[in-house]
Image (tube, grey):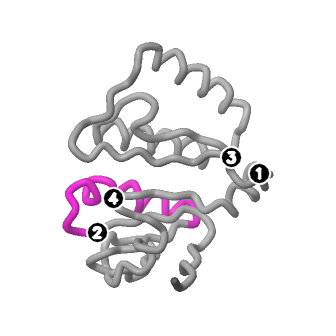
Amino acid sequence: MPAAPPLPPGLVAFVKRECPTCQLVAPVLERLAGETELTVFTQDDPAFPGGTRTVDDRSLEYSWHHGIETVPTLLRVRDELRTLAGITAVPELSRVHRHRVAMPQYLVGHLERVAAIEARAAALPALALAGAAYRGVGVPDCVRSGEGAADRLLG
């Protein structure tokens, strides 16, 4: 099997124009592109989204090699963690959970665990948490948490 093509450092997004959720997050990506290093791999239209540096991934070469099954997907390439937070270790655990036919359900005590995680993360100014794992699973919740994380990191 050929080696996976490398991803550029910084934020990396995978999107496609025909995805309604990608349409919703396009303004967030455009804002991020103006404030930090962002590369967008587009699976169907190299002009989407506007105002960003895009890479044509219509062949799905990057998506396939990097295990991208869902769009939109936003990654922070590890080199960025070394620069921002001095983290050089390989993660001991990394998981992506996909709920193909249902919305994720939080367990009892979830908000207390989130508060504890956020308190520890607050000590690391170069780290921001975002996504459905914290305070809401709907698209508006995730967009809100992503915007909040971007605001925290970019000032």
Where on the picture, by quarter, is residue 99? top left
Q: Residue at x 80, y 52 (%)?
A: 86
Q: Residue at x 33, y 27 (%)?
A: 105
- The residue labelled by disc 3 is 92
Q: Amino acid at mark 3?
A: Glu
Residue 33 location, x and y as percent?
Answer: 49, 64
Q: What SS does tag 1 mark?
A: loop
- The image shows residue 112, relative to residue 154, as above or below, that is above
- The image shows residue 123, relative to residue 18, as above or below, that is above
Q: Amino acid at mark 1?
A: Ile
- The residue labelled by disc 1 is 87
Give the residues drawn in magenta, as a range. Answer: 16-37
Q: Residue at x 68, y 50 (%)?
A: 91
Residue 92 location, x and y as percent?
Answer: 68, 46
Question: Is 35 part of what is drawn in magenta?
Answer: yes
Tell me the chief SS of the magenta region. helix
- The image shows residue 134, relative to residue 43, as above or below, that is above
* Distance in Å between CA atoms under marks 3 and 4: 24 Å
Q: What SS does tag 2 mark?
A: loop
Q: Earlier in the sequence, mark 3 or mark 2?
A: 2
Could you say which is closer to the camera, residue 96 or residue 33?
A: 96
- The residue labelled by disc 4 is 70
Q: Residues within 10 Å of mark 2 (few under 14, many from 20)?
A: many
- The residue labelled by disc 2 is 16
Q: Residues within 10 Å of mark 3 (few under 14, many from 20)?
A: few
Residue 108 location, x and y as percent?
Answer: 41, 14
Q: Are marks 3 and 2 in contact (CB under 8 Å)?
A: no
* Distance in Å between CA atoms under marks 2 and 4: 10 Å
